[in-house]
Image (spheres, rainbow, N blue to C red):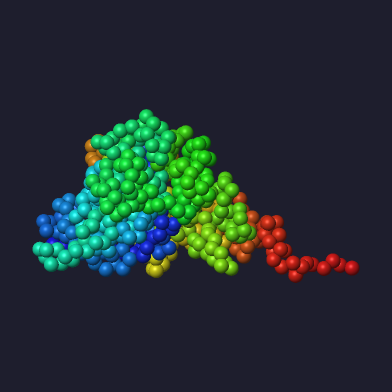
Amino acid sequence: MKTYIRIGLILVFLFGIYISPAKACTNFLITKGASADGSTMITYAADSHIRYGELYFSPATHWPEGSMVTIYDRSTAEPLGQIPQVPYTYQTVGFMNEHQVAIGESTFGGRSELVDTTGLMDYAALMFLATQRAKTAREAIKVIAELIEKHGYASSGESFSIGDPNEVWIMELVGKGTDLQIDNQTGEPMNKNKGAVWVAIRIPDGYVSAHANHARITTFPKEDGKRSISSKNLDKITDTNVEVVYAHDVISFAREQGYFDGKDAEFSFSDVYAPLDFGAARFCELRVWSMFSQVSDEMDEFWKYATGEDLNAERMPLFIKPMRKLTPQDLMSFKRNYLQGTELDMSQDAGAGPFGLPYRWRGLTWEYNGQEYFNERTTVTQQTGFSFIAQMRNWLPNPIGGINWFGVDDAGTTVYVPFYCGINRVPETWAEGYGDILDYRDDAAFWVFNRVAHFAYLFYNRVMPDVRKTQSELETKFAQYTPGVDAAALKLWETNPELAREFLTDYSVNMGNYTVKRWKELGEFLLVKYLDGNRKQEENGRFLRNPWGYPQPPSFPGYPDKWKKEVIRDTGDRFVYPKSE
């Protein structure tokens, strides 16, 4: 029997044709000791200009003997081949499974010659298959390593965030290129270098980490997989134990290729397989710095490195100890960063226009009069298909403990809705296949949020206070509901686990539907309030009328002085109004 996972179509919309290191995704990793309630958390933002935001769902399934999984090319949906299906796959809600194992990723590219043109497993296939087959983060690492060793790796360099209720790991891997030789037995060409080189590090408890499209693992412990850290490149704390696993040839392959000739202890995965350049620092490491700077007062020393001003400066630690305990709501806030509070605040320069828009449309780099320039690449970005905060809690049964705080479209204008990992279904308007990037549906969650976001882009600093008010209202409500929902589900679980799962399903589906309804109403409200560049009078969401029922006069906000100066500088006296005699 053949079983077909729709990885192909997912890959086309989810990951796009190619995601360069400067354009894709941002991940945060939080350990139990660094969170406010003892949960572990990872985040992911699936950024692409052709990615459709939808909540994937696959039920737990027993597969008949001989079942196969078809793997599709991520850019064309062309079938690449098949691999054997395992006897049983776990339920998944997005990139989180029923055992509270969650995976996120960011592409870092690395050396272009290391892309394997013969491989079968790309990073999306690895994410889907690992969440369907692993009960712990360690098992997920093992699944990924075995899949690429057996079937070959089809992507460029990749960083994975992998978490379960007890641990979070960062895993980085890159292919080994294509070296075709004729197989003596089959007579067919085969790749001598099939597979990938990789390193996985468990983030020590009490610490946080992040990655954003550049390889971040530098030197790492190599004695029995565990010892005290001494390298400043890995962490400035010297008494923290780090657990690490890695491919047996991660160093020897680099030597064979002429990438590295130093001592094993000096080997740095990132420096060898993904050498740092200005783009990797400014477009990628700066996003890590942005998150770290919000939880630590010691990040100023890494500013020149992160901005690309000094590429020889000391690299940022792979992980740091935060000065406060973090919640899912903190991570939602971090996902909305556009360098506000720094000299690079995207809402303050001329590119923001008269309404302080902290986004720049493509391209990331641009040319004028023979000189190349660039736009900042911040954590929040308009082209996000979906993002999530996966929260894993080891003191609760798995179906109750795992929450996928999931949002579609731009993280700045989305709402993160709680979908428990034990639910039996997802809301239709959030579900896979309900519309796509070329198929508009006016009640699909993705399109509802996009309509509001695109209206906000027109008059950003005017409209966003209204958006943030409703966003905060919903996300605060969900956070306040969570303890009660947990308690009710746990009480049901003690006598009837299936009823507990149905209760969580009803709650998650209802909150998803309510959020779409509320956001549609917000879009209608914003259209009325800001029609034609005016601002109508309202109180608590109700528009004001005079005693005879006619609208109260709107206000006319006009343009800021900075915009007026730019117009005058560009046009001179053209618009000077003559003084009367």
Residue 338 on image: x %, y %:
52, 51
Figure quadrant of the C terminus: bottom right
Return the residue found at the far front. Answer: 261
Instruction: Name which quarter of the figure residue 399 lies in.
Output: top left
Q: Residue at x 52, y 46 (%)?
A: 304
- Up the image or down, 376 lies above or below 167; here it is below
Return the residue found at the far right. Answer: 581
As rendered, which of 204 and 53 lies closer to the eye? 204
Residue 194 visible, this orientation: yes
As rendered, which of 498 and 404 lies closer to the eye? 404
Instruction: Name which quarter of the figure residue 331 lies in.
Output: top left
- Up the image or down, 326 lies above or below 367; here it is above
Number of marks drawn: 0
User: Is 134 placed left or right of 441 in the picture?
Assistant: left
Q: Residue at x 35, y 57 (%)?
A: 111
- Up the image or down, 558 lies above or below 33; here it is below
As rendered, which of 33 and 505 lies closer to the eye? 33
Residue 259 on image: x %, y %:
33, 52
Residue 291 visible, this orientation: no
Q: Residue at x 49, y 64 (%)?
A: 363
Figure quadrant of the N terminus: bottom left
Residue 486 on image: x %, y %:
34, 38
User: Is 125 placed left or right of 459 in the picture?
Assistant: left
Residue 345 on image: x %, y %:
57, 50
Q: Residue at x 41, y 45 (%)?
A: 210
User: Is 276 placed left or right of 346 in the picture?
Assistant: left
